[in-house]
Image (cartoon, rainbow, N blue to C red):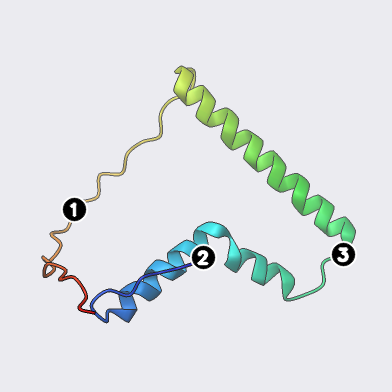
Amino acid sequence: MQVLVRDNNVDQALRALKRKLQREGVFREMKQRRAYEKPSERRIRERAEAIRRARKLARKQAQREGTAPMPKRSSRPTQARPMQPSATPPSI
């Protein structure tokens, strides 16, 4: 996994890395591996995850077909983001 650091902005690169790791499920897997998981517990967890995935897939498909209502959009007010200086190409 690779994250580029632009303009020595390590904080922004770190946030991007954390976001990528979260999407990949690395944090969830690390938490699971902290302690031993019995095979029976593992089977139960995996079945529950499979059921959750199947329900989510069925819900998405029903929404596309129009048989289920679309999710409500949150009406959060958008915040004005401060303008960032234009990125200058790195000098070699």
Q: Residue at x 89, y 56 (%)?
A: 40
Report which quarter residue 41 is drawn in: bottom right
Disc 2 versus disc 3: nearer the observer? 2
**Residue at disc 3, secondary structure:** loop
**Residue at disc 2, secondary structure:** helix
Q: Which residue is mark 3?
A: 38
Q: Quadrant of the C terminus?
A: bottom left
Q: Residue at x 55, y 58 (%)?
A: 24
Q: Residue at x 58, y 36 (%)?
A: 56
Q: Is residue 24 above or below residue 67?
A: below
Of all residues, the one furthest to the front in this rendering is 92
For label 2, count other residues whose C-alpha is less than 10 Å away and answer few (under 14), some (14-19) or many (20+): some
Disc 2 versus disc 1: nearer the observer? 2
Q: Earlier in the sequence, mark 2 or mark 3?
A: 2
Q: Earlier in the sequence, mark 2 or mark 1?
A: 2
Q: Which residue is mark 1?
A: 78
Disc 1 from disc 3: Cα separation: 46 Å
Report which quarter residue 89 is drawn in: bottom left
Q: Which residue is mark 2?
A: 21
Q: Residue at x 66, y 71 (%)?
A: 31
Q: In the rendered structure, are the residues bearing label 2 and label 3 in contact, judged by CB atoms less than 8 Å apart?
A: no
Q: Earlier in the sequence, mark 1 or mark 3?
A: 3
